[in-house]
Image: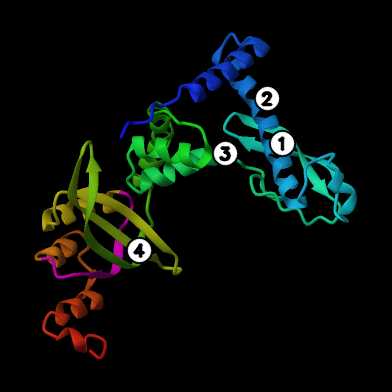
Amino acid sequence: MTMARKTKQPVEKNRMIARQIIEAYKPKTAEDMNNALKDVFGPMIEEMLKAELDYHLGYENNSKSEKETANRRNGYSQKTVKTEQGETTISVPRDRDGSFEPQIVGKRQSDISTIENQVLAMYARGMSQRDISKTIEDIYGFGVSHEMVSQITDKIMPKVEEWRNRPLEKCYAFLFVDCMYVKLRRGYECTECAVYSILGYTLDGRKELLGIWLSESESKNYWMQIFDEIKARGVEDVFFLCMDGVSGLEAGAKAIFPDVVVQRCIVHLIRNSLKYVPSKDYKKF
């Protein structure tokens, strides 16, 4: 069996479109090119909306079937939407009975810069840059370079650092501390890491995630560093702390917050107790 040769037609077609844009706009700077893309993006969306309306009505524009249906086209409405290239105004087609619900740009949707959100969501799930590029191409029909994926994901790092170092409340009624092991991709390897987390309840009952920390394993010493950090970020007192049975964790917490009342987590107690219960009796227990 012979392998099918990949065609160069899509690449040549993309280059032809690029040349047409450059010839029409003659951009001199990156900003000029960005403005050109914004101008092109609007008509692209409009053509897709027209195709959606054709499907909704069941016939194309200026078709003979138009006279045989009660619902017809009813002009356009102007709408300003936010894209990755900035704001642009598009003409949204309408139908007479108002039953047309466009999908690419919803009736009350004004922000369609979803590619970045999709990339970040896939990045958060641990997908590689290559996997993200392939998925975007499969869904949207155009490729996203590895460099673009990297630029998009790098945008959130300052926000992540700002969140990690933000000031905390002076007092928390409850802190739930826990550590779980998850597999994380680092370069080309997938390793198991300890993920520390602290969930707090403020005095007015608001739930807040104080932070997430990564380490190679769970230990009393690392918990001490975390407690020191949250104290440096403004936490002066904690009423109750709920924890599992990690050796030395209670003493470590009280060394930083002397008046805290430490409670064992009932979920961990039940899980540990289940080791001594036959599986058929789990539910009853």
Q: Is residue 168 left or right of residue 180?
A: right
Q: Are marks 2 and 3 in contact (CB under 8 Å)?
A: no
Choose the circle earlier in sequence order: 3 or 4. Answer: 3
**Disc number placed over residue 39 in the picture, else none:** 2
Please state which of the two labelled residues, at mark 1 or mark 3, is closer to the viewer.
1
**Disc number placed over residue 46 in the picture, else none:** 1
Measured as percent of width and height from the top left, residue 128 is found at 32, 39
Q: Front-most of 30 and 146?
A: 146
Choose the circle earlier in sequence order: 2 or 3. Answer: 2
Cα gap from disc 4 to disc 2, whole angstroms: 48 Å
Residue range corresponding to the magenta coloring: 233-246
User: Is residue 188 found inside the magenta-colored segment of the image?
Assistant: no
Please state which of the two labelled residues, at mark 3 or mark 4, is closer to the viewer.
3
Residue at mark 4: 200
Element carrying mark 1: helix
Measured as percent of width and height from the top left, residue 72 is found at 85, 49
**Disc 1: CA contacts within 10 A as few (<14), some (14-19) or many (>=20):** some
Specify the amino acid type for callout 1. Glu
Residue most extreme to the front? 1
Residue 86 versus residue 51 in the image, above or below = above
**Disc number placed over residue 113 in the picture, else none:** 3
Q: Front-most of 194 and 244?
A: 194
Choose the circle earlier in sequence order: 2 or 1. Answer: 2
Residue 158 versus residue 257 in the image, above or below = above
Q: Are marks 2 and 1 in contact (CB under 8 Å)?
A: no
| Residue 73 shows in this picture | no
Specify the amino acid type for callout 4. Gly
User: Is residue 239 found inside the magenta-colored segment of the image?
Assistant: yes
